[in-house]
Image (cartoon, rainbow, N blue to C red):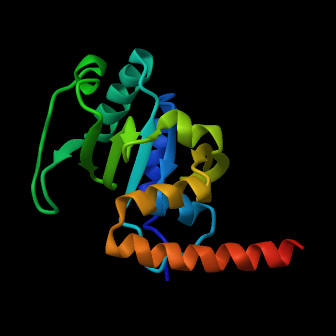
Amino acid sequence: MGGHDGALDRIAATLAEFGVRFVVVGGYALDVQSYDIGYRTEDIDMAIAGTAENFDALSAALKALNAEIRISHQEQIPFDHTGETLRTKTLWNLVCDHGRFDVATRYSPDMTYDDFAANSHPVTIVVDGEHHVIQAADVHDIMRSKRAANRVKDRGALDLLETQMRQRRSRDC
């Protein structure tokens, strides 16, 4: 099961091209690290560095993506932004032609970009034949975040992840 729509890679690649400092978290991060969470990932969650320069880079990337604010699965609204205006919120729910994505400076009460970045792993994605290195959160940090969210789908994913981690440990021994 699992997997993601390759179009989502374009979102991450665009942010990387614009020099945005981010770590992919959640289902997408697990998928690009070859973990199966039991369902198809339909969006990307990204923890971003909260510096003024990073928000300026994010604004440029969002303009290149023609990103809009996502109100619901069917409704979105265009928005004009700068790095300064993007800094006014800790979470943006967005959508573009390539899919849905969330950018946040904080996940759950105690998980920030710095927390995810400390243990993240470089992962190479390929978009239109070009290789892009992005940072993916460590599985343990993602699991901690999923436990804090405590959604039904997260609880099921946690069980699958625990099993896969045990299998990987036994193969590595």
The image position of residue 58, as x and y in percent, is 38, 29
Residue at the far right in the pictured view: 173
Above-or-below relation of 154 to 145: below
Above-or-below relation of 87 to 139: above
Q: Residue at x 65, y 51 (%)?
A: 123
Q: Residue at x 43, y 45 (%)?
A: 46
Q: Residue at x 37, y 24 (%)?
A: 55
Task: Residue 129: tell me if it is visible.
Answer: no
The image position of residue 51, as x and y in percent, is 43, 19
Residue at the far bottom in the pictured view: 1
Label tally? 0
In the rendered structure, the answer to whether residue 82 lies left or right of residue 172 reads left
Q: Residue at x 32, y 35 (%)?
A: 62
Q: Quadrant of residue 47?
A: top left
Q: Quadrant of residue 80?
A: top left
In the rendered structure, the answer to whether residue 136 lies left or right of residue 173 reads left
In the rendered structure, the answer to whether residue 56 lies left or right of residue 22 reads left
The image position of residue 173, as x and y in percent, is 90, 73
Above-or-below relation of 162 to 8: below
In the rendered structure, the answer to whether residue 6 lies left or right of residue 30 reads left
Given residues 162 and 20, the one toward you in this image is 162
The image position of residue 148, as x and y in percent, is 40, 57
Task: Residue 59: tell me if it is visible.
Answer: yes
Given residues 170 and 74, the one toward you in this image is 170
